[in-house]
Amino acid sequence: MFKLLVERMKREVVDMDGAALLNVIVSSDVTRAKSPRFLKMLEWVENVYLSQGIDTINLERVFTEKYARTGQAPCWKTDSHWNARGHLWVARELMKQVLNKNSAHRTREK
């Protein structure tokens, strides 16, 4: 069912309207271990979007890697909502995506 939903969304938004789609897998509390089943589900979701040619940012992966490297959490200690650091990390990932897309678009125009 989910695969069909993504296929239809691509058909109606990208193919018919010419708009770009970006899938963002949102992260929660990276200070807690995730089950292998949960991580496998996230990977499956990411792959469904990628199979349709829809760019994806996996913030779970980004946040987990940054947290492991810096020891600084992107969420509050009392709940999983993003703190200022988390918002900064998201902004940077989105900016990278936009800049990469614009760069690729300019290269194709030449």
Image (cartoon, grey):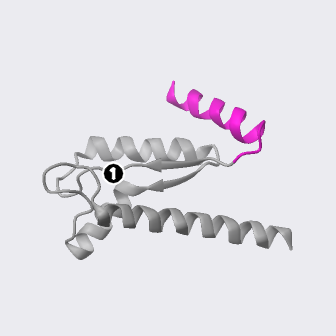
Residue 70 position (above or below residue 12): below
Up-down relation of residue 10 to residue 98 (above or below):
above
- The secondary structure that most of the magenta stretch takes on is helix
Identified by mark 1, the residue type is: Ser
Q: Is residue 49 above or below residue 33?
A: above
Tell whether 99 sits left or right of 58.
right
As rendered, which of 106 and 78 lies closer to the eye? 78
Q: Check if residue 8 falls in the magenta segment.
A: yes
Per the image, the residue denoted by label 1 is 27
Total count of labels: 1
Judge from the rendering whether residue 106 lies leftward or rightward of residue 98; answer left or right: right
- In percent of width and height, residue 44 lies at 44, 42
Q: What secondary structure is marked by label 1?
A: loop
Quarter in which the C terminus is drawn: bottom right
Residue 37, image x and y in percent?
28, 41
Query: Which residue is at a point 18% across and 58% down the rendered structure image?
Result: 31
Residue that protrudes farthest toward the front in the picture = 84
Neighbour tally class for label 1: few under 14, some 14-19, many 20 plus, Cα within 10 Å: many
Residue at figure coordinates x 38%, y 49% from the top left: 26
Instruction: Give x and y (percent) for residue 75.
Output: 24, 57
Please provide percent x and percent y for residue 58.
43, 55
Extreme residue toward the top, this view? 1
Q: Is residue 59 left or right of residue 23?
A: left
In the image as oriented, which residue stretches furthest toward the right? 110
Residue that appears at 47% across and 50% down:
24
* Picture quadrant where residue 85 is located: bottom left
Which image quadrant for residue 38? top left
Residue at 63% across, 43% down: 52
For the record, the magenta segment spans 1-19
